[in-house]
Amino acid sequence: MEQIRVLLVDDHAAFRAGLTALLKPVAGIQIADEASSGEQALALVGQVQPDVVLMDLAMPGMGGVAATERLVRDHPHIRVLVLSMADDDDSVFAALRAGALGYVLKGARKAELVRSILAVHGGEAIFGPAIASRLTGYFTGLAKREQGFPELTVREREILSLMAAHMTNPHISERLGLSGKTVRNHVSNIFAKLQVADRAEAITRARDSGF
Amino acid sequence: MEQIRVLLVDDHAAFRAGLTALLKPVAGIQIADEASSGEQALALVGQVQPDVVLMDLAMPGMGGVAATERLVRDHPHIRVLVLSMADDDDSVFAALRAGALGYVLKGARKAELVRSILAVHGGEAIFGPAIASRLTGYFTGLAKREQGFPELTVREREILSLMAAHMTNPHISERLGLSGKTVRNHVSNIFAKLQVADRAEAITRARDSGF
DNA sequence: CGAGTACCCGGGACAATGTCCCGGAGCTCC
DNA sequence: GGAGCTCCGGGACATTGTCCCGGGTACTCG
């Protein structure tokens, strides 16, 4: 049976030891090595060749976010699973932006942790319950902003999309073969329907609505 | 051992049958019922009381997205795992906005599917490999947009933040006790530094950069 | 101390943007 | 045959943005 090689990155030796003891008896998972800092992790991945890196975020020196960013950039085949205490929005989204495939809190039960390692190893993305609620909150929050988007005519939607692409009125009129005046009138009507005062706000609204 | 009650929602009877055959022998998972449309699923959840709903997206009548939206709104304790053919951005993010906790492609292997059901049942969020890459692309794409935000002076940041609040130049000048002309000049300088042409784009940039 | 630099404050002249009017053409629905 | 839209444009006007300009202040460097 092929083993999943895991690299542990955490500044607390006791936590690494506990994790090793927890994962040692699991079939299919093998602790390849440990690192106590982001710098050390980056230095080790070359020779250790892990499949999955279990990454803590709060560490002295280079934090887990920066380490993750460099790791996924230099070794795209390695999957990073963040294992952190922090469940605030900033930490979660910073890890995601850095390229982490998963995010699990340190309080996770063994079954959840093992499942997460297996999932991440297969290229799946997985997030613990507390993190999952932040993620869905993020997207359904977006959805909420979408509601109440007024109905626009075909022409108006066409023009709004060109506006959202940061085109000036003359460019739009040229593209559509219209008079500059007509475009400005359409633009004005769009503003009225969206209940906004200017181009800037109209584009913000359109963007938030996934236009 | 407690069973996870799963409700299958898909308009193809053959696919439901295949899925049932696949999941039947799995310990801990139980197919509670099947539905062939979004409407039928909504009608069934009350009496079936599933823990997890396996939801297809492309269905005649009410689609999976709309069904998911109503389902999570009316039954927050039920977790929705989308099982779809579509791997485009629109489908994935529409499902997320609707409140789905997971998204797996129909080509997924049995192990991945079972793992996803278990994860979603525990409140975790999980996404198949193809979907995971879209998700990380979304967030690392955000990160890319954030970089390279030029340095602005104190005054300029002050004015930009008021612009982002959709204030007109006269309002800004009044608020700051400046001449309207001065504000316009500041605004113009901000545009030059941000390398944008108008208010709209400046605000978009500021927003994307978490200003 | 003087020179240079960066920031802040404004004016002038001009182009682009947006507002509130107006009328005409096509189109559907009753 | 209206009644009500959407679309197309004009006129007059205010706002916004651009590219110039100069004066004042504060800071650093030689």
Image: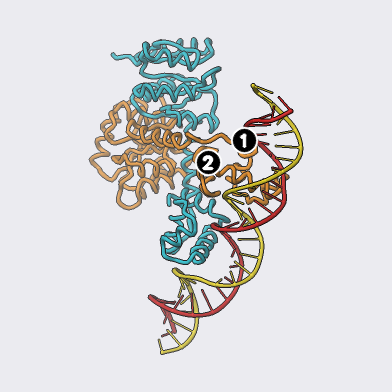
Chain colours: A orange, B cyan, C yellow, D red
> Where does label 2 land, which residue?
A194
Where residue B171 appears, as percent x and y from the top left, is 45, 58
Q: Amino acid at mark 2?
A: Leu
Q: Amino acid at mark 1?
A: Thr
Q: CA distance from mark 1 to mark 2?
A: 12 Å
Compared to residue B79, the image places residue D15 above or below, namely below
Quadrant in which residue D19 is drawn: bottom right
Q: Nearer the viewer, residue A118 or B164?
A: B164
Q: Nearer the viewer, residue B68 or D21?
A: D21
Q: Residues within 10 Å of mark 1 (few under 14, many from 20)?
A: few
Q: Secondary structure at mark 2?
A: helix
Q: Is residue B107 visible?
A: no
Q: Nearer the viewer, residue B48 or B73?
A: B73
Where residue B37 appears, as percent x and y from the top left, is 50, 15
**Quarter of the image where the N terminus of chain B is located:** top left
Q: Residue A11 vs residue A158: left or right?
A: left
Tell me whether circle 1 and circle 2 mark residues in contact (CB < 8 Å). no
Mark 1 / mark 2, whichever is N-terminal = 1
> Where does label 1 land, which residue?
A153
